[in-house]
Image (cartoon, rainbow, N blue to C red):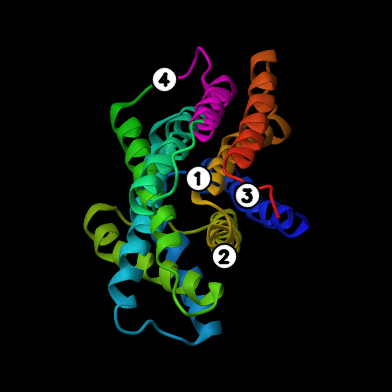
Amino acid sequence: MKARTSDLLLTAIAPAIWGSTYIVTTEFLPGFPPMTVALLRALPAGLLLLLIVRQLPAGRWWPRVFVLGALNFSVFWSMLFISAYRLPGGVAATVGAVQPLIVVFIAAALLGSRLRWPAVLAAALGLAGVALLVLTPRASLDAVGVAAGLAGAVSMAFGTVLTRKWQPPVSLLTFTAWQLTAGGLLLIPVAWALDPAIPVPTAGNLFGLAWLGLIGAALTCFLMFRGISRIDPAAVSLLGFLSPTTAVLLGWVFLNQALSVAQAAGVLLVIGSIWLGQRANGAGRG
């Protein structure tokens, strides 16, 4: 029980930190093109970890690593930043919050996991909580931003399940290094072809990129993949509701964005959905 609880708490650190992505992107990287931001988030972190582990994939793991790198990083982060730049942060977070609903069904199809309706209910409740948190009357919708958010959610959902399905005979740090590097390499031609040149970076820009890459990528992805290897993917995915919750709380603390009664209720609903999801997926049992 204690070991499983510690696994959940360590894994939960990742989506909580990811909740800082929107405020860091808008406050420290205004005007940066989204594909380039995704590239600069993935590739330096991946190469740094690769220098530490000094091990490359072999045999069938080459194509698998690039598939996972594309799903978990190239596609997901590109779509995340497009959505973040085109939508209010709360709306972007709500669109991405459909991921746990998708994971439940993909895990059933690809892993043979039993479809637990309490888990589906928990994901739906979590989505409702996120909606209370971030969908205000002033929220505006952009079709491209919404489509990008949905595409990113689907990509990460498949990546989460396949990461659990494909477990290589290497350390989690090595597995993380492979995926980050592969995801970053795949983004090089895309960013080169689609994005304009980035502005001359300031100290604030460099801080934002360092935070997104070292803390928001290398550290958090290691923690997330560790959790995926030990906990049911649907249970791990439900922790993703911590991201929009953290985003709203950071806006309240640092940007003086007040929490309404509905938003406070959303926080409680998100926490309740995570608890219900862990119970439904047996994550709390030793």
Q: Main secondary structure of the magenta part?
A: helix
- Say which label, 2 or 4, has the lower sequence index: 4
Q: Determine whether the residue tagged by mark 1 lies in a helix, strand or loop.
A: helix
Q: CA distance from mark 1 to mark 4?
A: 30 Å
CB-based contact (under 8 Å), mark 4 and mark 3: no
User: Which residue matches tag 1?
Assistant: 234
Q: Is residue 187 left or right of residue 42?
A: left
The residues colored magenta run 118-140
Q: Is residue 234 left or right of residue 32?
A: right
Q: Determine whether the residue tagged by mark 2 lies in a helix, strand or loop.
A: helix
Q: Which mark is residue 140?
A: 4
**56 or 250, nearer to the observer:** 56
Q: Quadrant of residue 85?
A: top left
At x 54% / y 31%, what residue is drawn?
118
At x 45% / y 59%, what residue is drawn?
200
Q: Determine whether the residue tagged by mark 3 lies in a helix, strand or loop.
A: helix
Q: Which mark is residue 30?
A: none
Q: Quadrant of residue 67?
A: bottom left
- Say which label, 3 or 2, has the lower sequence index: 3
Discs 2/4, front: 2
At x 29% / y 78%, what residue is drawn?
60
Q: Which mark is residue 17?
A: 3
Discs 4/3, front: 3
Packing grade of label 4 (10 A; few <14, some 14-19, many >=20) is few
Q: Is residue 130 magenta?
A: yes
Q: CA distance from mark 4 to mark 3?
A: 25 Å
User: Which residue matches tag 2?
Assistant: 222
Q: Quadrant of residue 42?
A: bottom left
Q: Position of residue 37 (x, y in %)?
A: 42, 55
- Residue type beneath disc 4: Ser
